[in-house]
Image: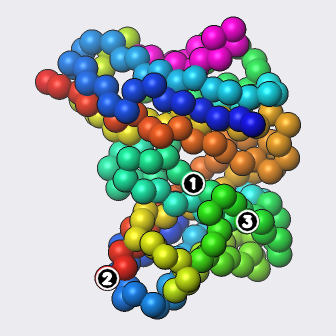
């Protein structure tokens, strides 16, 4: 089955630790995205990548980093510089074309203790 | 600048009655508009999308939306609510001239369906 996988589903970390969230897609999509969702709010864009080895900051990139070494993978690292990292993180991908919808993974809920 | 406003943060209907979730958008260009649904602790699923073709768009699970340029609206409707429709719904706009595919999300509307 084609789709987007995110792992793990739940993640707990101590304050001050870096943590990496996994996102893999087998849809052969060029573009991939990371969003953050907080309770009662819509999604906010953290980083996006339109092609391998290239990525751009979204609206709330501070305290996060990404890499795009392979087309199917777009891991997100939440660094200790992120002041409020507890949130639900969603990864998405889309094919080329500005009017194509994004397909979303199931999400990772990160809790920093 | 483009933006999207969902006019109700919470909507409650009885099973079998119509659903109306309201969305207004702001865009300087011809927008692409989407409705996504999110069940608790899940990812988002596309319900339907408008990309400058027919103004009445039919989606999955009996939902549809009408693009009204004069009112800058893209309201989501369903004739008869089902218990499984209870979820969070997001109205989303993509800038028509954007070459990045970036989406702008509304704040979301929680749909409650009562038996």
In this orientation, which residue lies closer to the viewer: B109 or A32? Answer: B109
- Span shown in magenta: B64-78
Q: Could you tell me which residue is drawn at 77 percent across and 66 percent down?
A: A56
User: Residue A79: where, in percent of width, then height?
Assistant: 55, 84
In this orientation, which residue lies closer to the viewer: A90 or B79? Answer: A90
Question: For residue B78, what is the image quadrant?
Answer: top left
Q: Could you tell me which residue is drawn at 39 percent across and 27 percent down?
A: B8
Q: Which residue is mark 2?
A: A113
Q: Could you tell me which residue is drawn at 60 percent across and 32 percent down?
A: B4
Q: Which residue is mark 1?
A: A44
Is A94 situated left or right of A109 in this image? right
Is A72 situated left or right of A40 in this image? right
Which secondary structure lies at badge 3?
strand
- Residue B67 among magenta residues: yes
Q: Which residue is mark 3?
A: A57
User: Residue A73: where, in percent of width, then height?
Assistant: 66, 73
The reply to whether residue A57 is visible in this rendering is yes
């Amino acid at each position: 089955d084609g789709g987007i996988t995110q792992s793990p589903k739940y993640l707990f970390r101590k304050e001050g630790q870096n943590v990496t969230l996994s996102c893999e897609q087998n849809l052969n999509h060029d573009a991939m995205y990371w969003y953050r969702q907080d309770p009662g709010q819509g999604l906010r864009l953290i980083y996006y990548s339109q092609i391998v080895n290239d990525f751009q900051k979204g609206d709330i990139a501070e305290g996060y980093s990404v890499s795009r070494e392979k087309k199917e993978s777009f891991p997100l690292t939440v660094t200790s510089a992120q002041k409020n990292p507890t949130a639900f993180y969603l990864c998405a991908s889309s094919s080329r074309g500005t009017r194509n919808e994004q397909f979303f993974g199931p999400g990772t809920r990160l809790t920093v203790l | 600048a483009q933006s999207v406003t969902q006019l109700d943060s919470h909507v409650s209907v009885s099973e079998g009655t119509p659903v109306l979730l309201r969305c207004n958008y702001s865009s300087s260009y011809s927008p692409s508009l989407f409705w996504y649904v999110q069940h608790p602790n899940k990812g988002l699923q596309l319900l339907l999308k408008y990309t400058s073709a027919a103004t009445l768009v039919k989606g999955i699970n009996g939902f549809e939306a009408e693009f009204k340029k004069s009112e800058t609206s893209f309201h989501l409707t369903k004739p008869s609510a089902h218990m499984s429709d209870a979820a969070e719904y997001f109205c989303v706009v993509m800038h028509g001239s954007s070459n990045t595919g970036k989406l702008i999300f509304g704040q979301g509307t929680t749909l409650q369906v009562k038996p």
